[in-house]
Amino acid sequence: MSWVETKNLNVISLNDIQVLPLNDFRDELIKKIKGGKRLIQFFGNKETPGVFLYAVAADDNTSKLFITSCKFTDDKAYQSLTPEIPSVHLFEREFYEQFGIKPEGHPWLKPVRKGIEGINNDEPHYNFFSMTGEEIHEVGVGPIHAGIIEPGHFRFSCHGEKVYHLEIKLGFQHRGIENMFLNKNHKNVYLLNLSESIAGDSVIGHAGTYIRAMESLCNIAVSRRVKSIRTVMLELERIAMHLADLSGLSGDIAYLTGSSVFGALRTKIINATMSICGNRFGRGMMRLSGVNFDITPEIKCDLTALLNKLNDDVDLAAEVMFSSVSVLERFEKTGILEKETAMELGLVGLTARASGYAVDIRSDHPFDAYQYFPVYKLTLESGDVFARAYIRYIEIQQSIKIIMEILNNIPSGELSCNISSLQPDSMVISLTEGWRGEISHIVLTDSDGKIKRIKIKDPSFNNWLALSISVRGEGISDFPLCNKSYNLSYSGFDL
C-alpha cells in the first residue's frame, strides 16, 4: 500500500510509512486530493543521507488520516504539485526554503519567512508583484504597525481606490519555534511554555495540541475529567476571541455600541478563565498528563451563571447589530470568498465555514470531550464579511451549549498521571479545532525516543492568502474591515 492509514492522535511506526519513488509520490498525492481528500501537512525532515518529504491527507467523512513519503538524495528538484493541487502552493514554497529542493513549475515560488532586507544579507531577495500603467499606484502598509500588532507588510496594487492585487509578506521575526523543541527532555516544562507561545491568542489551542501529541507518544491515557476540563477551556478561548473580533469589527465600521458591548462581554469570559487558572489567556492551565487546575463546584456554579447571562447578552447585542442597516451596508457583499476558492486553497476554520466549506476538527477528527459530545458543523454560504462576523456569533452560542453540557455531565477522575518515555522511531498527528481553525502538530521521534522533528501548522498558514483574494476589486478603505473579519495570526505564521 502507498499510504499508511491512521487517525488523530494514533501513534504509528516510522518504519511503516512507505517511501515511494518521487513520481509515484507525486501521482499518489494528486490522486488522493483530487479524489476528495484534504491536504493536512506537507513537510520535510533532514536525514542521513538525504531529505524525507512527508504528505498527510485527511478523509473528513471517515475521520481517517493518510501518510506517505518520498526521499531526496541527489535530486534537488521535482515537478511542482501546485498546478494540480492549489492547496499545496505554500507548503511547497516552505519546503524549498527549508531544504533547497525546487518545485519546478511552481507559479509563485517566493520566500515564505525569508527574503527580508536588513535581517540576513545571505537570504534571497523578495520581489513583490508589480503592475504597470499611468494610473496604477502602489500602497505599502507595514511592516511596522500601530499598537502591539506584530510585523507584516501589505503591498497593494491599485487603480484609484480599487484594489487589483494584494501581496502579503510575513515572517519578519525569524522565530525558529520548531527548532526550539528539539533535543529537549519532553518532561521539561519549558516545552509546554513554548507551545503556549506559538500564538499568544491561542494558548489553549496550541498547548493542548502539543500535549496530546506527547501523551500519545508516551501512551498516556488521561481521565475523562481532564478531557472535559481541557474542552471547557478551549471553548472559553473560542468564545473570548469571537467576542473580541465582533468588538473589533464593530470598531472598524464606527459601530461604537457593538465595540463597547462585545468588548465588555469578552472581558467577563477572560476573567472567568483567570478565575480557573490565574491567567486570562489560559497560561499555566495545561500540563503534560493532565491539567494544573480543577473546575471546582464553586467555579462550576459561577461559570454556569455567567454563561446563562452571557447567552442572553450576546443574543441581544447580536440582534441589534445584525439588524442595523448601517452595519449590514458595510458587512454584506464585502470581501467575498467563494466556496470553490476556499476548497481549492484548502482553507480551514471559520474562514472556510463562512464560505460554505464544512470543515471542523471537533466533528471530523474528534479529540478530548468532543469524543463524547458530538459537534454539529455550522456553515454559511455568502463568504463575505457578514458571514465571517455572523458565524462568530452562532459559534459563541454553540460553544456556550457545549460548555454547559460538559459541566452538567463532568465525571470524576484524577487530574494527572505518571509520565513515561516517548516511543522511539514513531510519528503522531495531533489535530485541534482552535478558534481560528485547524491546528496541526506532527511529532517524529528518533531511535532514542527524543523529538527529532516537530511540524507545527497554525490555521493562519492556510488562510492568509484568502485575505489577498477577497480584497480584489474592493476599495482599499475596506481592507481593514476585511482584514479584521479574518483576524489571522502573524506569530502563528512566523515559526
Image (cartoon, helix red, strand yellow):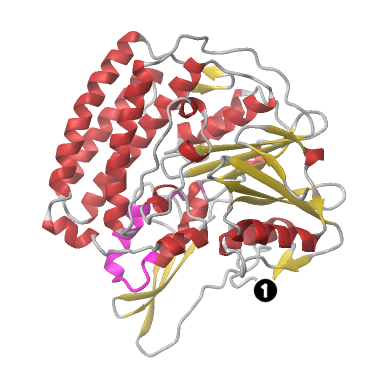
Residue at image x 29%, y 29%?
269
Q: Nearer the viewer, residue 227 or 209?
A: 227
Residue 240 placement (x, y as % from top left): 32, 35
Taking 126 as reference, is 249 above or below it?
above
Taking 200 as reference, is 76 above or below it?
below
Q: Report helix, strand or loop for mark 1.
A: loop
Residue at image x 23%, y 61%?
332
- Residue type at mark 1: give it: Gly
Residue wearing tag 1: 105
Q: Residues within 10 Å of mark 1 (few under 14, many from 20)?
A: few
Residue 225 placement (x, y as % from top left): 47, 15
**Viewer can see residue 489:** yes
Q: Residue furthest bottom?
A: 134
Q: Say whether residue 251 is left or right of residue 400.
A: left
Residue 349 placement (x, y as % from top left): 44, 47
Q: Nearer the viewer, residue 198 or 345?
A: 345
- Residue 404 position by quadrant: top left
Magenta span includes 476: yes
**Viewer can see residue 491:** no
Residue at image x 44%, y 20%?
229
The stretch of residues the image draws in magenta is: 470-492
Magenta span includes 47: no
Taking 225 as reference, is 403 above or below it?
below
Residue 371 placement (x, y as % from top left): 49, 28
How many circles with numbers are drawn on the protein?
1
Residue at image x 36%, y 77%?
158
